[in-house]
Image (cartoon, grey):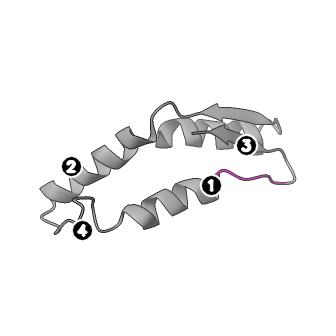
Amino acid sequence: CLTALTMAEYFRDVNEQDVLLFIDNIFRFVQAGSEVSALLGRIPSAVGYQPTMSIELGSLQERITSTKEGSITSIL
């Protein structure tokens, strides 16, 4: 998910192109974050997700934006 977004940012910023980004299953990103969080010994939230999930999803979505060089449109 993050690798695809980094590639989309490259095409937007360096190649000055508009990019359509498909993320077929955002749950995989959340699940991977939960697994890493558990390995680091972080206490999960009441529903079992990592305590930093909202920050991680927020930063992911903040990167999907338009600039002077181009734009990224996403379908999640």
User: In the rendered image, which residue does mark 3 sit on?
Assistant: 72
Mark seen at residue 35: 2
Q: Label 2 amino acid?
A: Glu
Relative placement, left or right, of 43 versus 50 is left
Residue depicted at x 64% and y 34%: 21
What range of the chain is rendered magenta?
A: 63-67
Q: Is residue 68 left or right of residue 44?
A: right
For label 3, the SS is strand
Mark 4 or mark 3, earlier in chain:
4
Instruction: Name the disc covering residue 4, or none.
Output: none
| Gap between marks 3 and 2 measured at Cα | 28 Å
Q: Which mark is residue 45?
A: 4
| Residue found 57% across the figure and 42% down from its top | 6
Q: Earlier in the sequence, mark 3 or mark 2?
A: 2
Q: Mark 1 points at which residue?
A: 63
> Dots 4 and 2: beta carbons under 8 Å?
no
Between 48 and 6, the one lying in front of the other is: 48
